[in-house]
Image (cartoon, grey):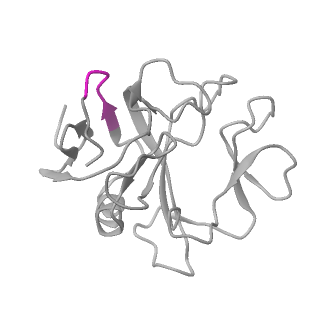
């Protein structure tokens, strides 16, 4: 591991010499991720994308992509676009990336079950803003807005995200 890796620790994510509080999946960490299990997948993942709401904040990095009104993420294991960015209209189950709340104002996507998604192994494992401290996610890793922006300004495509299977994270 290097200081350039995002590493989940019991106190939060360690990155570039700082430890930033975060929340993980409501069900904790799993080595057997399944769609809808509310768990954060253990393993070594990579950052694959950076998305932001241009009507709510400035691009945090040159490689960031704006989230538009029709941007979706398919979470239907039976659909060909499963665990991929797509556009409305989409009849299959999906998440709207342009939400009314601020949770997805800034998203770092990961390579969990991507690019060749296996049906049912889970989708949309993002780094995003938390609802509040210690509030578990649906499987993502969530941060205070200012910490997420700090990470987004410094991470790059391919940055490693390491989630140890043995981590006893306290949703701090």
Q: Residue furthest toward the top?
A: 32
Q: Position of residue 6 (x, y in %)?
A: 27, 42
Q: Residue furthest toward the left?
A: 17
Check residue 164 for magenta coloring. yes
Q: Work out which quarter of the rendered image holds the N terminus and state it.
A: top left
Identify the residue at horizontal 33%, vertical 53% (top origin).
155
Check residue 150 for magenta coloring. no
Q: From the viewer's perspective, is 109 left or right of 8? A: right
Which quadrant would residue 11 be assigned to in this image? top left
Who is closer to the viewer here, 78 or 23? 23
Q: Position of residue 18 (x, y in %)?
A: 14, 53
Which span is picked out in magenta? 161-167
Identify the residue at horizontal 63%, vertical 60% (top origin).
97
Who is closer to the viewer here, 105 or 67? 105
Q: Residue furthest toward the bottom?
A: 55
Who is closer to the viewer here, 83 or 64? 83
Q: Is residue 126 above or below residue 166?
A: below
């Amino acid at each position: 591991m290097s200081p350039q890796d995002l590493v989940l620790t019991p106190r939060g994510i360690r990155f570039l010499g700082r430890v930033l509080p975060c929340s993980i999946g409501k069900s904790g960490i799993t080595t057997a991720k399944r769609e809808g299990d509310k768990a954060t997948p253990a393993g070594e993942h990579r950052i694959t994308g950076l998305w932001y709401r241009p009507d709510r904040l400035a691009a945090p990095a040159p490689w960031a992509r704006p989230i538009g009104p029709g941007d979706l993420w398919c979470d239907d294991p039976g659909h060909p676009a499963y665990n991929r960015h797509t556009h409305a209209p989409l009849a299959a189950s999906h998440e709207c990336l342009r939400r009314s709340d601020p949770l997805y104002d800034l998203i770092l996507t990961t390579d969990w079950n991507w690019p060749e998604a296996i049906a049912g192994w889970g989708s949309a494992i993002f780094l995003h803003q938390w609802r509040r401290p210690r509030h578990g996610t649906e499987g993502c890793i969530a941060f205070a807005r200012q910490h997420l922006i700090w990470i987004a300004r410094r991470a790059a495509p391919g940055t490693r995200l390491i989630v140890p299977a043995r981590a006893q994270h306290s949703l701090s």
